[in-house]
């Protein structure tokens, strides 16, 4: 081979390498585009998840506040209950609560009977006294019903 043929061969080899490298570059560019698009999609998904997490954090905080409020109300009711009834001897919460519920239910029945008897009486001579008596009885009935409900809830805890 003479020098000119060697140069032609080197030129041909060089051109083949260039074509091969151009093909590699085109392939890398396509891969880069695909990677870029995948990164864009992942970024959108991450932003969406971030929004969801922020919403969950806010909802969790709201639920914690609600839970704290319920605990405070429960604690107040329980402390009121214990401060009212703890001075009794041999205070056993469950048995005492059940006894108190039955006692209050008996009082409630008695008051309702009194209320029914008062309603059945013919015209009372003093309507003001009768209306005051009705109010007192109704107030006592409501208080007893609230006490029974509170005691039943406390018993369930």
Image: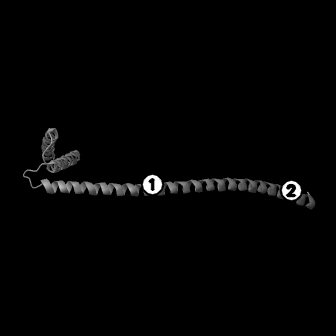
Residue drawn at (89%, 60%) of the image: 7
In the image, taking residue 131 as reference, residue 24 lies left or right, namely right
Q: Please identify, in this view, whether the residue under mark 2 or under mark 1 is nearer the observer.
A: 1
What secondary structure is found at the residue carrying circle 1? helix
Q: Residue furthest left?
A: 89
In the image, taking residue 36 as reference, residue 60 lies left or right, namely left
What secondary structure is found at the residue carrying circle 2? helix
Image location of residue 63, percent across then percent down? 38, 54
Q: Around disc 1, counting alpha carbons within 10 Å, would you say few (fewer than 14), some (14 to 19), or many (20 or more)? A: few
Q: Which mark is residue 12?
A: 2
- Of residues 135 and 107, the one nearer the viewer is 135
Q: Which residue is mark 1?
A: 56
- Of residues 46 and 113, the one nearer the viewer is 113
- Of residues 146 and 59, the one nearer the viewer is 146
Q: Measure the C-alpha gap from mark 2 to mark 1.
A: 65 Å
Residue drawn at (9%, 55%) of the image: 87
Residue drawn at (19%, 47%) of the image: 138
Image location of residue 8, percent across then percent down? 90, 58
Image location of residue 32, percent across then percent down? 68, 56
């Amino acid at each position: 081979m003479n020098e000119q043929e060697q140069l032609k061969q080197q030129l041909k080899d060089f051109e083949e390498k260039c074509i091969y490298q151009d093909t590699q570059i085109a392939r890398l560019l396509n891969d880069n585009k695909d990677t870029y698009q995948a990164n864009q999609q992942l970024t959108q998904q991450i932003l969406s998840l971030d929004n969801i997490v922020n919403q969950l954090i806010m909802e969790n905080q709201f639920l914690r506040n609600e839970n704290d409020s319920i605990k405070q109300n429960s604690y107040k009711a329980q402390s009121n209950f214990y401060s009212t009834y703890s001075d009794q001897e041999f205070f056993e919460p469950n048995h005492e609560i059940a006894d108190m519920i039955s006692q209050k239910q008996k009082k409630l029945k008695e008051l309702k009977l009194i209320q029914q008897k008062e309603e059945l009486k013919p015209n009372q001579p003093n309507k003001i006294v009768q209306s005051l008596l009705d109010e007192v009885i109704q107030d006592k009935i409501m208080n007893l019903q609230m006490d029974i409900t509170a005691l039943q809830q406390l018993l369930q805890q």
